[in-house]
Amino acid sequence: MIEQVIAAARKHGVVAGMHTGSVQYARQMAAKGMQFLTIGSDARLMAAAAAQATTGFRSGVSAQPAAGGY
């Protein structure tokens, strides 16, 4: 089906594109001829960055309680 969409888009001079959920799948679709790709949604990318920041923060936290309120 994807190949049919790409072929029809080329035939009519339209950019073929789609949403993907990973870099790997986006690369596969680009190799097939997709010209416009998203790699995840804004919400998923922000959630992943927040999780990474939280993990980084927690891994560097001292066992000592903080001296101040902030």
Image (tube, rainbow, N blue to C red):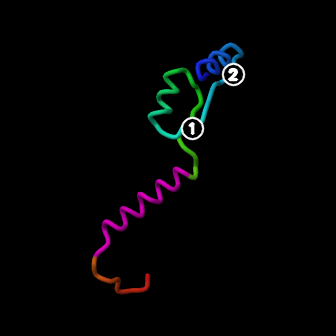
| Mark 1: few/some/many CA within 10 Å (<14, 14-19, 20+) | some
Q: Amino acid at mark 2?
A: Val
Identify the residue at horizontal 31%, vertical 68% (top origin). Answer: 60
Q: Which residues are magenta?
A: 44-62
Does the magenta stretch mainly form a helix, a strand or a loop? Answer: helix
Q: Which residue is mark 2?
A: 14
Q: Is residue 49 magenta?
A: yes
Earlier-in-chain disc, 2 versus 1: 2
Q: Amino acid at mark 1?
A: Thr
Q: Is residue 18 magenta?
A: no
Q: Which residue is mark 1?
A: 38
| Mark 2: few/some/many CA within 10 Å (<14, 14-19, 20+) | few
Name the image quarter holding the C terminus. bottom left
Identify the residue at horizontal 31%, vertical 65% (top origin). Answer: 59
Identify the residue at horizontal 35%, vertical 68% (top origin). Answer: 58
Name the image quarter holding the N terminus. top right
Relative height, residue 51 to residue 40 (above, below): below
Who is closer to the viewer here, 1 or 45? 1
Q: Is 31 on the left-hand or right-hand side of 2? A: left
Dot 1 lies on which element?
A: strand
Outermost residue to the right: 12
Identify the residue at horizontal 62%, vertical 20% (top origin). Answer: 6
Q: Is 60 on the left-hand or right-hand side of 35? A: left
Q: Residue 56 appears at what percent x and percent y?
A: 36, 62
Dividing the picture into quadrants, the one containing residue 24 is top left
**Disc number for residue 56:** none
Dot 2 lies on which element?
A: loop
Q: Residue 34 appears at what percent x and percent y?
A: 57, 25
Q: Residue 26 appears at what percent x and percent y?
A: 50, 32
Dividing the picture into quadrants, the one containing residue 57 is bottom left
